Amino acid sequence: MSLIDRRTFVSAGVAATATAAFALANRGKTAAPNSSPSETINVGIVGQGVRGSHLLPNFHQPEKGVVVRAICDANQEALDRQSTAFSQRYHSSVDSCRDMRELFDRKDIDAVVIAAPNHWHTLATLWAVDAGKDVYCEKPASHNLWEGQELLAGIDTDKRIVQHGVQLRSAPAIREGVQKLKEGAIGDVYMGRAVIFRRRESMGPKKVVAPPPFLDWNLYRGPSNVEEYVDGILKDQNWHHFWTYGGGEIMNQGVHEIDLALWGLGLEGPPSDVVASGGNFLWKDAKETPEVLNANCKFPEQNKLIDVAARTWCSNFEDDVFTGNIFYGSEGIMLVSGYVRYKIIMGEGKDRKPGRWIDSGDPQQAHVDNFISAVRSRKTSDLNAPISTSRAACALGHLCNIAYRTGEKVAFDPTTNKITSPSSGEQYFKREYREGFTLPKV
Ligand SMILES: NC(=O)c1ccc[n+]([C@@H]2O[C@H](COP(=O)([O-])OP(=O)(O)OC[C@H]3O[C@@H](n4cnc5c(N)ncnc54)[C@H](O)[C@@H]3O)[C@@H](O)[C@H]2O)c1
């Protein structure tokens, strides 16, 4: 059954079991064998907003044998804008569609990019993998703790290549910095601070209005069971401020910094002990998620701590870091600024010896190239950010949000993926999924 047939079947309201059966029967098996190094890799991009537009030229590299064949967006205006930009820039056309399942159903597409809002990432990735595609999935790969677990269970990484869109993992300078941490350049590293300062605007008071005519609201909502359309969510990525689609700054910019904190500290799983506090202090606007979020995440077994600071609007730099990390060791600290550079500062007080920045520039193209080279080699081990790394990074962010929302310390068992307390945290473990948009059963 094709994915298109499957969609019609779903809307007839009888497909839940059949969909799951299809998924089980086909997971990773429908793939046309991916190309040999000399063959062209055909790519489809889902989501033509800010991110999709940035990634398109990174992927459309005919001289390297990588071609964007199709683009998809639930927003017809975004689709038209991107199609026009594509033909003006490349003097050729690109196919377009509103429903990503049409793109996944195409036999000529080898790999897809998921750059839709966060609430779509896990479902879209699993649909794509089931259709035999390799996937570059934007961060965060999951929208809740349950999705993080289902996502990994649903991907056979021997068959499918799935990269998490945390590009700093492909920055030579950051890779070198992490290696230095491992080698003891600042002594025993016991704490990482994720610095997440981004200047976001007020979005004004909440106004529920009809979705604009150019938007396929059914497709945009996807798994979300919230029907109301809030004015302004399409502008400036404001959807990030609503629990339905995003998870606030910590699940936006913060995923990069949290991922690096875990990587730098050599931690592979989520924390077991999380406290958080924050709120909305600047504006009385429509945002649901906090403008300010401070959290502490403990790893008692490894005796390490991750400190998370997310702020908005006016803020200071912390030792030249606005978004980035500060690692604390027994003999010094390491600063990481953005996705591009690191610096070591040895000693304390008057012994403080600042090093110099080591900078390797924007790693975005390198991250895409790394994905493409793994698509050719068919080896997940070639990826700089295999999807397995998304679990801990996303789970840590989700747990901080749960600690904030419950107002209580959250105890989590990373081996069973269960919130052990408070019981009020369980409501945030998983969302309710709309019929036709449930995750394929593993
Ligand atoms: N790695 C990075 O540095 C980086 C940077 C920016 C954004 N991102 C991630 O990229 C994703 C997109 O962010 P953005 O800033 O582009 O947001 P955006 O709102 O600008 O764009 C999202 C696009 O997805 C479209 N969309 C929604 N539902 C869809 C569906 N069912 N099918 C197809 N398209 C759909 C929207 O209409 C919109 O055009 C987010 O998850 C974000 O976290 C990553």
Image (tube, rainbow, N blue to C red):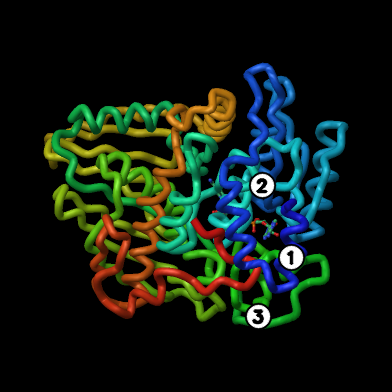
For mark 1, give the secondary structure: helix
Q: Which of 340 and 356 is in front in this view?
A: 340
Label 2: few (<14), some or many (≥20) within 10 Å?
many
Marker disc for residue 9: 1
Residue for point 41% across, 58% down: 315
Q: Where is residue 186 in the image (x, y as percent from the top left)?
A: 18, 33
| Residue 313 shows in this picture | no
User: Pointer 2: what residue?
Assistant: 52
Which is more N-terminal, label 3 or label 2? 2
Q: Is mark 2 within 8 Å of ligand 1?
A: yes
Q: In this view, does 40 lie above or below 26?
A: above
Check whether the beta carbons of the residues at disc 3 and disc 1 lie within 8 A of each other.
no
Q: Is mark 3 on a helix, strand or loop?
A: loop
Q: Which residue lies furthest to the top in this view?
A: 38
Residue 368: image quadrant is top right
Q: Position of residue 41 (x, y in %)?
A: 69, 29
Amino acid bearing label 3? Glu
Q: Which of 188 and 355 is in front in this view?
A: 188
Q: How many labels does the image show?
A: 3
Q: Does the residue labelled 3 lie within 8 Å of ligand 1?
A: no
Question: Is disc 3 surrounded by few (<14), some (14 to 19) or many (20+) residues within 10 Å?
Answer: few
Instruction: Report the residue at 82% width, 71% height from top.
Output: 213
Q: In which quarter of the image is ligand 1?
A: bottom right
- Along the polypeptide, which appears first: circle 3 or circle 1? 1
Residue pointed to by mark 3: 228
